[in-house]
Image: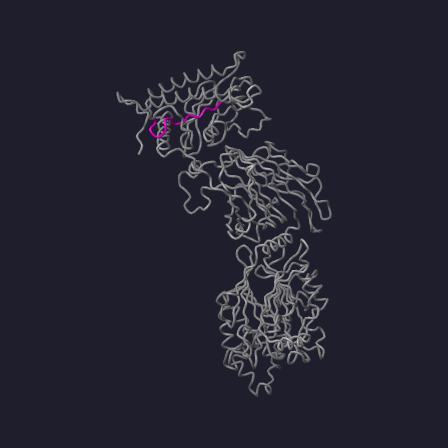
Amino acid sequence: MARIAHISDIHFGRSFVVDVWNRIKDEIAAFHPKTIIASGDFTDDPDPLLLLAAKSELQDLCKRCGEGTEFFVVPGNHDLLDLGNILHPGSAKWFDRVMFRDTTDLRNRLQSDLGFPFGLNEETLRWTKFPRFRRMRPSNWLSLATRTDKCDGRLQSCDYRRAGRRWPTRSIHDRTLITCLDSNNPSLRQFVFATGTIGRNQIERIKPSNLLPACPCCARAPAETENGGILLRVAVLHHHPMPIAVRDKSLDDAEQEARLEPFLILKNSGDLVHELQRLKYDLVLHGHKHRPQFARVELGADRPERYPILVLAGGSTAKRDEDPSDNTLRDIGTEPNGRLRVRTFWQGNLQDERNYREPIEILKRRAFARALDRTGIKAKHLISDVVIDEVGHLRSLDTTSHLRVMDKDRTLTGLVSNVDLAPHDTRLDVELEEGSDRAALCVRDDAGNLYRLNDPRSPADSFYWLNFHEPLAAGQQPFTFAIREAAANSMAMSQWEIEQRSHGRGGAGDPDYGYEEVGSHISYPIEKLTIRVTFPPNFEGIAPRPRCRRHPAMPDFPLRYLPEQRPRRNQPRPQLISDDDLAKEEMRELTYDARDRAWEVEIDHPIPGCSYSLQWRVPDPRAPQKVCDRSTAYRKMLARLVDPSCDDDIVEKCRERFDRLARSLMKRFHFEYDDTEKQTVFLMLYEPADLCLRPALTQGPIPDGNYQVPLGGGVAGAAFLQRQIIAWKNDPNSKSLIRPASSGALNSHWVLALPVFHQGGRNAKGDELDTEPGAVLAVITLGSDSAASRISECAPNDDDPKGEIAKEIGQDAQILAQQCVFDMLRIIGKVGDQADPVVPTVP
């Protein structure tokens, strides 16, 4: 965050009030700015020793504020002209020597001889009025002390030399570009009065092209560059670039002010403001008229590229003959998201009613402009269209329109296609839907080698890459492209699933616990972002909320579209920071289309480095607590089948019962004309500690392999989590996102997965199945290597387009599976002559 203290018109002399200055100085030290800006008129009349006192005071104040604090100055008309409007020979030379050369030895010698600290204090003020002051001519000492061009090491002093001892100075400090201009009339001739002018040569040098790489005197190089993240661009001058309003004055006073204004104005203020606005400056800080003013200027407000600029008049600092409100200190800073805020102090007292926070719209325009400077590219529109189905699969189409390179010195060879998915997601079916005439979607490794999609030779840490056939450069036609992709098992559809994935630890301290979201990360400037999410019917009544999270390193966020800055799988992701202000701003743009069950938010100028999303509370349609507890007990009973300590007789009896079920299913779904058909049956049990399903009992030819499937993954894992019968066909053209999770050794063409549920409700009485989350006990799967397997009868077909007959066939098979599993529970639970404890006791 940037932090600036702005003061102006100190006028160290007859009307200077030390007590007021001390209060202001204490306030500045209290909020620890990294930058102190003083916009001229340090003295009443040109006097090098008074300038030295002001510089010494600013140096001491920087030390109080902490390491790394710098001050920046510009000359005022009173620093160069007697009484502010009469020629004073050599005054510009003295300002240069005092402010930009090393005066440490001279100050130490003066303090040693005088016996008091040299600065803006009572002792120095009295000494400057003493008659011997003129006879001693200590200015001669100053001339000797600054005869050699020894730099004082300040950043502005070094930048002054880097610019060839010409104004403006242009410094980058604390993520702020500070351009200091000399607004005094260039000739300093007689009868210019107190007017000002920014010479054409200064305006042309606001954006320099030939700065030295380091200070020629002390070799100090800039600590920061514009290639990094710049938060603010600030211009500093002395004269007011726009009229100062007359407040609370009579008409006579107003007329008098109007007569004086021609003798005070900045003559070419329009040219200056226009150029600063063209270069996307955010602040103009000035003084001169001793009246604070706060204005926002927006030349060309009718243009889409309009850019408002804030003009702050600083008033005076500690003058006796001013209204208290005219002795002004401004605390200027940025909030963590870059939002500008300004606090105003009158005579060192904070004025709460004068606090300013800029509108979010201006923050977004500034962030857009800064990111454009940094990246050199921009796009007109990104549309992220996401569809979520009833079981949590996600399909998206991301369309980027009018991508272009704006910087003539840059080219773009491609873009990283990066999507943040949960660890349990499987990214599938990625394809370039639009833009294939100018680019191809492929896989790239860190060495720059390209691979086809799904090429098994691609390294583990490779990434999706949109490769341009010809590098994109400035002046070319803008490029529009669309990437379609799908992710299986992507969205949690119940709170029960969320609890399982958190291993029951809950969401202590995690504000996102229990929520899901979809959205986009912005890593380069985009004029408009549209996020659209279509909910399944079972999400009726659920309303999402816009969310914005920023990268902790903003504005130096990683440019994720570049290969070298992309997120890596083996590196921890940075903890993004929620920004409620930005989210509330976008909430007003959220709309709902009831016909399509689609929520949509449109965001103008989304802030690069931020992730925008629509977030919603996941529903909780779980079974009653007794049913959930009893289901957990059932699963633990079944898990004894794979426990070596389980009695062999129990295992054998359960196997016999399972074999009868397996033979029944094999017979029912065998294709009678295929004598070579191979069928396999599994009893898959859920292991919550590892979030997976493992086979407990099998029947049929089982090649060696790993048949464990993750929760929600594969056919069995999907049936368990989705709580529905699944008839899956191995068809490359299928729209299903379910993929086998095993090694593929079974080579199944068809798989039928039958979830087994708790039945009978709270009291476990009756045959009605409890199909809510938390009530699934196990999954029975039947696989066949025959494309003609009668498992196909459990899937909709041309003769049964609505799947009604298929549903009945699947339910008949499920009844057999239910009976088998509950028979095994009776076998496991039976102890001696005790009645079958198939209904375990739960609280």
Quadrant of residue 79 within the rendered picture: bottom right
Read off the magenta span.
752-764
Residue 343 versus residue 77: which sits nearer the camera?
Answer: 343
Residue 660 versus residue 632 in the image, above or below: above
Which quadrant of the figure has residue 131?
A: bottom right
- The one of 794 and 576 positioned closer to us in this rendering: 794
Q: Position of residue 283 (x, y in %)?
A: 61, 63
Image location of residue 126, percent across then percent down: 53, 83
Disc count in the image? 0
Q: Within the magenta stretch, is there residue 757?
A: yes
Front residue of 244 and 692:
244
- Quarter of the rendering occupied by the N terminus: bottom right
- Residue 562 sits above or below residue 66 on the image: above
Q: Position of residue 3 (x, y in %)?
A: 54, 62
Horizontal side, residue 828 vs residue 810: left or right? left
Q: Is residue 221 visible?
A: no
Q: Residue at x 70, y 61 (%)?
A: 210
